[in-house]
Image (spheres, helix red, strand yellow):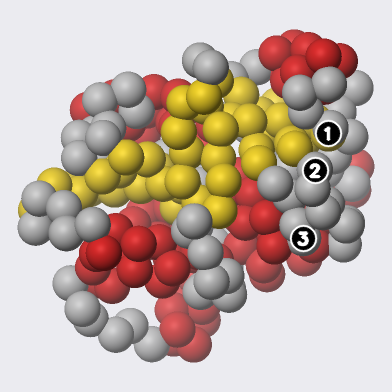
Amino acid sequence: MHIEIDSLEGGARRARGITVIIDVFRAFTTAAYAFDQGADAIFMIGDGASALQLRASGRADLCVGEDGGKMIEGFDFGNSPYAMSQTNLTGKTLALRTSNGTRGLLAASGAEVIYTGAFATAEATVRRIKAQNPEVITIVPMGAMERRATEDEVCALYHRALLQDLSPDKAALKSLMTSLVPPPNPTLVASGDYHPMDRELALTADVMDFAIRATYEDGLLVARPE
């Protein structure tokens, strides 16, 4: 089993084999909490207009996401794991658009299998990957606007450690991440676009018992829990 870590959108384009696209703050933590609250599927979308069209057509029930950290006009929710955790989403289909995470998924055209990556789903994702006994695994920390992000890079290393049958100390990991990652942009917090609990949820590892796999259905990338 060969494990490659390759960052940013270029890394997503180069990804081969089973691929994990990581976006800790906040896309794939938001997706994890949406599925935890009963969502059925999530369309992973590259732009806000397409998400709104999916909702208008009835294919999606809710639009979720952000542009530059701010909720997109006309959307039902911003990119908030906490908001998802407080909402009954049973049977709902979401359209998710984010600045980094969904873009990375869409760029991974050479991947055989695509999973989303976040601390919340890391252990479950690794279990699913190991069950497939792959020859090649690519882990892609997406960063923020083409800049490497500490949380995504460390989350990639955490996935690799689990794949190598190591047992990282989760409490120590969270303490490290809390000390390394700066608090959210106060302007976004003040505007309500970044709930203070989003950071706490995003930095807590292995709270979900499912992985999130994205596959193409009728030309659209759709994620479902696995």
**Quarter in which the N terminus is drawn:** bottom left
Q: CA distance from mark 3 to mark 1?
A: 14 Å
Using the image as rendered, state which of residue 68 and residue 20 is in the foreground: 20
Q: Where is mark 2, residue-wise? A: 92
Q: Residue 165's spot in the image, x, y percent?
A: 21, 78
Residue drawn at x 35%, y 47% is 20
Tell which circle, 2 or 3, labels the residue nearer the N-terminal end. Answer: 3
Q: Classify 123 as above or below 215.
A: below
Crowd around label 3: few <14 · some 14–19 · many ≥20 (10 Å):
some
For badge 1, the amino acid type reads Leu
Judging from the image, what secondary structure is the residue with disc 3 in? Answer: loop
Residue drawn at x 10%, y 50% is 135
Residue drawn at x 61%, y 24% is 45
Name the side, left or right, on which 28 lies relative to 17: right
Q: Classify 130 as above or below 70.
A: below
Name the side, left or right, on which 103 lies relative to 75: left
Q: Where is mark 1, residue-wise? A: 62
Q: Which quarter of the picture shows residue 143?
A: top left
Q: CA distance from mark 2 to mark 3?
A: 10 Å
For badge 2, the amino acid type reads Lys
* Residue 37's disc number: 3
